[in-house]
Structure formats: structure tokens, C-alpha cells
Image: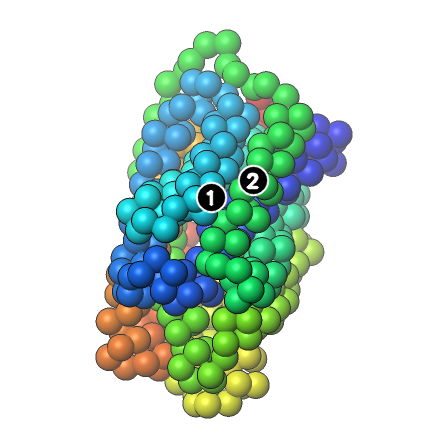
Amino acid sequence: MTREIRRALVATFIARSAANGALRVVYPFLPAIARGLGVSPAALSSLIALRNLGGLATPVVARLAERRGRRWMMLVAMTAVTLGCILTASSNVWLVAGVGIVLVGFAKPAFDIPMQAWFGDRVPYSERGRIFGITELTWSVGLVAVVPVSGFLIERTSWRAPFILVSFGAAIGTVAVAKGIGSDRPHEHVERSLELTPPRVRILATALLFSIAAEIPFIVYGQWLEGSFALSVAGIGTFTIAIVVAELLGEGLVTAYADRWGLRRMFLGGLLVSGLAYLAFSLTGAALGLATIVVVIWIASFEVTIVAAIPFATEMATEARERLLSLFAVMIATGRAVGALIAQPLFTTGGIGLVGVVSAVCVGIAALLLLGVEEHATPDAAIHP
């Protein structure tokens, strides 16, 4: 690993941890935040669906990154995360606070796309699983750094506390990127085109489906824990420790073994195991211990899926990485929006059991699609700018 890569890893690790914390803090405390804003959980779920459409703007992000540089785009995105958290924390007006929540949703993928393309151009494919696995550890770090303490802060102060906390982290992350990554603004703009070949369409459809599958239980798991196991807000915050362990397990597996076992194999395995976990939701009943085990398997396998999928996708369009990654983000955003919209009706109609069945069907179809996509890279493929 070169010094340039090490510095960039540290900078993006700090920034992305804060951005992920800002994005994720809404999920476990959705009922508490909704009560604080004087709206129903269904209304806040609809706002999250809108927030998740932020990925639809990533084709514009890709073009801006091509013109202005990836570092510039990352800095703009982190500034937007900071401002979004401040806006949400500073108002109890539903519309104003909602604008801040949505802004974070648009800023997060605007950071991820240039970051992933930056590493994709500099890291050989044979090492990409490990490097991308390290960057994806920020998904867990963002959760553990924000959510457990937020549960106690919300009970002792108000629902605004986590947004204040994350705004400071996002500001620090912005500075870290400014200091840790050198300017890469291109001297001249070269227009890049992307052909949507059948394998690329399959990988995009797979991203759509596994995102729908994951978002449905993510939206309702706070209500499920409150209703089925009588967990308090602080209890839900503590329960997230199990989720963090599961995420670290999944991300760690990809980081340690993906380059040895193959990204496609890890991707497919994650889809299949997560499908079994979704089906197991209906078996949990009122047993918190069993529910915890199922959630750990679900989260770990989902992390394996997405952490393997991203570096796998980076090598499917080496001539236009940002373009394909932006469409990948569009599919993930669309999947999350669809999942957020249907989660409440599914949970109301059939509880966590129906939620699990629908999610399992989605990942089953995704696995069938992935079977038609071959491992596509040479061992040391990388483009150095």
C-alpha cells in the first residue's frame, strides 16, 4: 500500500464514518424522532424514502467529478452532510428538519461515488477487496460511534442530540479530506461514455433487488423491537451493539478473504445466506435471543453482499468507472426508496414474517441474475491517473 493510499484511507475513513452516522441514526430511533417532530412513523418513513432518492443524482455527481476532480466532489458532499445535520438539529418544524435529513441522503452517495472511483483507479483489482473492505468498515464505525450514545442522549435531552453530535464529526471529516487527499482536478475534460451491456444491466438489477430486500427490515426493526420485545429507546440503542458486531463480521470477512476467494463468490454467498436469514424472521416469535441471532446473520450476510459488490462493479467499466458506479448508486437508492415505501404496509399487514418473505424473494432473484455475470477482471487491473 503506497503512502498516497494510506493517507487517503485515513481521511476517507474519518469522513465516511461521520456521513454514515448521520445517515443511520434515523433508523433505530425513527419512532422517537417522529414523536419529537410531531409526525407519524409512516410520515418519517416516507421522508426516508425521499432521502434515499439522493442516489438518483449520482450521474450528475459523476460528471462533476470528471470535470472538477474527485477530491473537490468529496469536499462538497461532506460540507453538505455537516449543513444537513445542523439544519435538522436547529429546528422542530417538520418541513425544515426534513430538508436537513434529505440533504444528508443526497450528500452521502455524492461522497461515495468519487471516493470509490478514486481508489478504483489506484488500487489493483487483486487488492481491491481489502481496500474497499476497509472503507466499508465505516458503515459499522458510524453506527457504533453515534447510535448507542444517541439512545441515552435522546432519553436525557431530546431527539436533536444525535444530529448535533454528527455535525461535529462531519466537520472534522471535511477537514481530513482536505488535508489527506491531494488535488486531482483534471487539466482538460474528457467525455466518457458507458455502454450498458447485458452483464452491466444484470449487476445493476442485482443492486436494486438486494437494496429493496435490506431496506424493508431496516425501516421497521425499531418498531419490531419496541412491539415484540418491549425494548425502550435506550434498549434499542444497546441492541445496536449486536448489529455492529454483525457488520464488522461481514465487512471483516470481505476484507480478509475476498481477494483470495474471489469477489463474485463472496457476493453470491452473501445473497444466499441473507435470503435464509430473511426467511428466519418468522421463527423468532417473542424470543429476543433468537431474534438477535437472526439479525446478526442477516446483517453480516448483507454486509458481505454489498462490500463485495462495490469493488466487483468497479472493474466492469474501467473506461468510465464513475458512470457505472453512479448507476449502481441509482439502483441502490431506488431500491431503498421502494423498500422504505412498502415496509410499513408489509409490516402492518403481516408483521416481521411477511417482511422477511418479501426480502428473501428479492435476494433470490438477485442471486439468479448474478449467476449470469462472470468474474471480469485481470488480476492486477488498475488505471493510474
Q: Residue furthest top?
A: 187
Residue 379 visible in the displayed image: no
Q: CA distance from mark 2 to mark 1?
A: 9 Å
Relative horizontal placement of residue 234, taking residue 218 as reference (left or right)? right
Residue 178 visible in the displayed image: yes
- Return the residue at label 1: 85
Q: Nearer the viewer, residue 339 or 146?
A: 146
Q: Nearer the viewer, residue 11 or 278?
A: 11
Disc 1 residue crowd, few under 14, some 14–19, many 20+, Cα 10 Å: many
Tell me the element at label 2: helix
Q: Residue furthest front?
A: 157
Task: Report the mark closest to the observer, 2 or 1.
Answer: 1
Three-letter amino acid code at the position of disc 2: Ala
Q: Where is residue 221 shown, x and y percent of the image?
A: 42, 71
Comes first in the chain, label 2 or label 1: 1
Q: What is the quadrant of the C terminus in the image?
A: top right
Q: Nearer the viewer, residue 236 or 220?
A: 236
State if disc 1 and disc 2 touch (CB < 8 Å).
Answer: yes
Q: Residue at x 43, y 71 (%)?
A: 222
Report the disc number at residue 170: 2
Three-letter amino acid code at the position of disc 1: Cys
Q: Where is residue 97 shown, x and y percent of the image?
A: 36, 47
Tell me the element at label 1: helix
